[in-house]
């Protein structure tokens, strides 16, 4: 534990982790390269710590020091106290939640390790049975919402295509309410070839798409498959031909009232719920 240190200079190098937080392009490059991500707000910071991520530093406005006292006491990381105007100058926005933490990224697990892992307590017993796979979801809010759905609706692991947006980017973490720190996930390296790993591990890969030839979601759910990987496509054009070809099944949610499709995160909520596994 270190005593909180009040800083006054926006160019202080100790504030480097928090600079230009509103510059999405810059932060998307910088954060993975520097091995950090930003947790924003008391709940998310606590969740990141509980999930086992190491803290690099914390940036608080004075009134948050007491609220975060237990976290401060438990971390060896430096804690910087700044006034709200200085926080805004450094980060580029008004930090409503008053507390930011820079956390250390962990190396991502291998896909096969993730698929063989035992789900965390309270997330089902025994083997991994439900996996969500997202292809090229570019919007951080959609990634966050999809992870929140996954955490809430019994998904054991999430796999991302190489071009999917970063779940640890600040907006994804925030929209997920910290669920990106809770649900095990990794990134596939070779797309769509790595979907073969799922099949090798006994998963049926079901691609969610709009084809009239697809089976309905109810039909898929009625099969009560033991191990199911649910594959979702990008916001604009949906799943690529390669991903559709690599899937075992094509599955659709019938749409009413001339509506073409659902938002991808909304789709995931419906699909996760309808295909939830029965008792093991
Ligand atoms: C906004 S949709 C993309 C729509 C795109 N025009 C297409 O043809 O797939 C994003 C993703 O959500 C899923 N999705 C949305 N509505 C769906 C539906 N009615 N049935 C199955 N999947 C759906 C699919 O995985 C899709 O790739």
Image: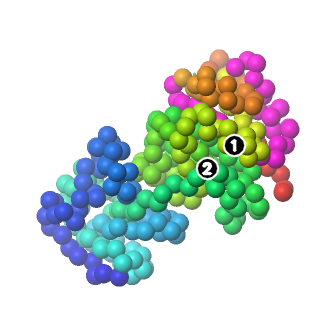
Pointer 1: residues within 10 angstroms few (<14), some, or many (20+)?
A: some
* Quarter where residue 75 is shown: bottom left
SS at circle 1? helix
Determine which of the numbered discs, if any, sits on residue 111 in the image: 2
Give the mark nearest the N terminus, 2 or 1. 2
The residue shown at (63%, 54%) is: 114
* Residue 68 placement, left or right of 127: left
The residue shown at (29%, 43%) is: 26
Considering depth in this image, is 202 or 146 the residue closer to the camera?
Answer: 202
Determine which of the numbered discs, if any, sits on residue 265 in the image: none
SS at circle 2? helix
Residue 35 in sight: yes
The answer to whether the residues at label 2 and label 1 have Cβ atoms under 8 Å apart is yes
Q: Quadrant of the N terminus?
A: bottom left
Measured as percent of width and height from the top left, residue 152 is found at 64, 53
* Residue 63 placement, left or right of 158: left
Q: Which residues are magenta?
A: 211-236
Measured as percent of width and height from the top left, residue 128 is found at 72, 54
Tell whether position 74 is magenta.
no
Q: Quadrant of the C terminus?
A: bottom right
Placement of 251 over or under 47, stated as above or below: above
Measured as percent of width and height from the top left, residue 30 is found at 31, 49
Considering depth in this image, is 97 or 138 the residue closer to the camera?
Answer: 138
Residue annotated with mark 1: 198
Residue 251 in sight: no
Pointer 2: residues within 10 angstroms few (<14), some, or many (20+)?
A: many
Placement of 63 over or under 200, stated as above or below: below
Tell whether position 224 is magenta.
yes
Disc 2 to disc 1, how far (Cα)?
9 Å
């Amino acid at each position: 534990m270190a005593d909180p240190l009040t800083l006054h200079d926006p160019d202080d190098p100790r504030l480097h982790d928090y600079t230009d937080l509103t510059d999405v392009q810059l932060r998307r490059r910088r954060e993975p390269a520097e091995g950090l991500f930003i947790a924003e707000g008391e709940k998310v910071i606590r969740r990141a710590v509980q999930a086992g991520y190491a803290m690099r530093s914390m940036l608080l406005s004075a009134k948050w020091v007491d609220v975060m006292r237990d976290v401060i006491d438990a971390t060896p990381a430096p804690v910087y106290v700044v006034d709200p105007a200085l926080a805004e100058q450094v980060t580029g926005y008004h930090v409503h939640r008053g507390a930011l933490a820079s956390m250390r990224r962990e190396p991502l697990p291998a896909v096969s390790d993730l698929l063989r892992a035992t789900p965390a307590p309270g997330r089902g017993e025994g083997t991994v049975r439900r996996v969500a796979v997202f292809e090229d979801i570019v919007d951080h809010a959609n990634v966050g919402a999809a992870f929140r759905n996954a955490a809430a609706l019994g998904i054991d692991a999430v796999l991302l295509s190489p071009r999917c947006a970063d779940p640890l980017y600040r907006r994804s973490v925030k929209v997920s309410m910290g669920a990106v720190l809770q649900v095990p996930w990794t990134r596939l390296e070779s797309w769509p070839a790595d979907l073969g790993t799922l099949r090798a591990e006994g998963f049926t890969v079901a691609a969610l798409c709009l084809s009239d030839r697809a089976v309905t979601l109810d039909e898929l759910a009625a099969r009560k498959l033991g191990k199911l990987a649910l594959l979702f496509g990008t916001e604009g054009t949906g799943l690529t031909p390669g991903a559709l070809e690599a899937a075992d099944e094509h599955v659709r949610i019938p749409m009413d009232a001339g509506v073409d499709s659902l938002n991808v995160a909304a789709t995931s909520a419906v699909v996760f719920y309808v295909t939830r596994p029965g008792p093991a």
